[in-house]
Image (spheres, rainbow, N blue to C red):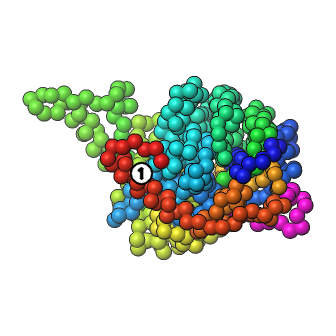
Amino acid sequence: MKSSTSIRRKVCVIGLDGVGLRNLRNMLGVLPLNGINRVVSKGFVSSFISLPPYTPCAWTSIFTGVNPGKHGIYGFYKVSRNGRITVNVSTSYDVKYPRIFEILGMSGLKSVVINVPLVYPVHELVSLKNLVVVSDWASPKQFIYPKQDEDRYREYLVEPPHKWASAVNVNSYVKAVEAFLEKRIDLYYELLEKENYNLFIIVFSELDWLMHRIPDIVMGKQMNLVYKVLALIDKFIGRVCEVCDLIVLVSDHGFTISRLFIGVNSILARNGLMMSSYKLNIDKLFHRQQPKKCDVGGKQGFNYITSRIIRNLFEVISVVTRKIVSSQALNKLEAIVPISTEIDYSSSKAIMLEPANWGIYVKEGYVDLVKKLFSNNRFVKKVLHREELFWGPHTQEAPDLILVPRDHVFFDARIHAEPMYLDYVSEHEPHAMIAFYGDYVLPATSMDNPINVSIYDLVPTILAYIGLPIPRDSDGKPRIEVFNVGFYNKKYDYLEKFKMLRKIKQLKIGKGGKVKS
């Protein structure tokens, strides 16, 4: 352990995406993971509840210390309801509360940020001059900020193999994930060893991808398939323990096996609440690219007219088909025929967009009807109004209703899914994990009473440890009882400063100026 004689201590937060405490103990039980075991056995470790257990909102809650009603992120998509439902991709601009690396930046301290969701576009982040940022896997392009670092480390910007759902061969997919991490981890070591920082944040998504693709890993089986990835992460954690004063392991959710699925959008459609339309892919049908238009006497030519006739005819056929063909048959039909089914957002009264956030967006006047529809489902534990789970100025942007599933039950948002069916799939569950190890940390075994840690406690705890004020409106609190010394515990309104800096940034962008702060 590095001993710090400076005022500012060096902190490293290591995110293990999807690895709940039960999942971690399964791995430690069968694999020699000395670095992780060092943190867990000698430090403080606890589980906490992450609701909903979904990557974008959970990591944003962890790194802001506030609930989605304050930071505004409920999924990878942002939904607006101005008379009709519209959907856009969430970006860094949609995060309405400063994350811990921005808080440190506003205080003149430096951070390295690797694979944290919603850092694109990078120019929307506050205090950029104090940040080194490596893009997350969901970014539309892989990048490193600042530009000179991207030029230096360009060879490490390989595409993340995150499309586990489309991986046909398990062994090939495992090798692709291993190759990706083997390449990227050299970059992580470079930044860990050579950059000047007060806070180093890295999220490892590889374990989440592998547990999704290989459900047996969640059950503690086929652990050989995850060993190489775990060994690389474990070795990195071992090195972090030598470099930093405080190490925090944290996850956004856990994994479990889901055996029963509820087809939420299918149920909504059968009750006339969700509308959809079929699209015929003419290009695929005739094995060519975009249909070309031929100029014939100033009019559109045969190819375009033919495609329009076929599309219109298919729309008529599809209406009849939906009434007489089963959902299972329609799913099979879509796999072999060049058609696709799309949600009609403008005419739908209610939709589930992202199953992992458990949310249903409902038009005004239909909330009670939808709540009653799912409250009568014995596999749904409870149906919550958004105000029962979220609070803050951005609560109105949340899904109107949150379905809480029973154990081993999950949701399916496919339009033609059966209303209920059995399967064997690994999915997210709410039991996440946090562990502290380092200077002044008391091991959990030395404590008389368990500490109920929340998802919001990481930010105020780290700020207090470093010696900075904690956010005035944080939903968490500094867990000073985890340490054997007292820490700084004043408060400051970082949100107002964050808003001001964002306004200045927008003015600079509007005037075509360069963004440095």
Give the x, y percent position of residue 337. 43, 36
Residue 320 visible from this viewpoint: no
In the image, what residue type sits under mark 1?
Answer: Lys
Q: Residue at x 61, y 46 (%)?
A: 110
**Toward which corner of the image does residue 381 lie, by quadrant?**
bottom right
Q: Residue at x 75, y 33 (%)?
A: 232
Left or right: where does residue 161 sit relative to residue 244?
A: left
Is residue 280 shown left or right of residue 212? left
- Name the residue that disc number 1 marks: 505
From this viewpoint, which residue is outermost toward the left?
Answer: 297
- In the rendered view of the protein, which quadrant contains the N terminus? top right
Could you tell me residue 178's position as x and y percent? 69, 30
**Which residue appears at 50% of the width and 33% of the height?**
147
Count of numbered labels shown in the rendering? 1
Mark 1, other Cα within 10 Å: few <14 / some 14–19 / many ≥20: many
Pinpoint residue 327: horizontal percent, then vertical percent. Answer: 50, 51
User: Where does the magenta region start and end?
Assistant: 442-458
Q: Nearer the viewer, residue 474 or 208?
A: 474
Instruction: Answer left or right for 201 relative to 288.
Output: right
Q: Nearer the viewer, residue 289 or 13?
A: 13
SS class, disc 1? helix
Q: Is residue 90 above or below residue 171?
A: below
Seen from the viewer's position, the closer of residues 240 and 74 is 240
- Magenta-span inclusion, residue 10: no
Residue 182, can we see it?
A: yes
The residue lying at 74 percent from left, 48 percent from top is: 6
Against 400, residue 117 (above or below) is above
| Magenta residues, dominant SS class | loop
Q: Position of residue 297 (x, y in %)?
A: 9, 29
Judge whether residue 456 is colored magenta. Answer: yes
Place residue 34 in its image quadrant. top right
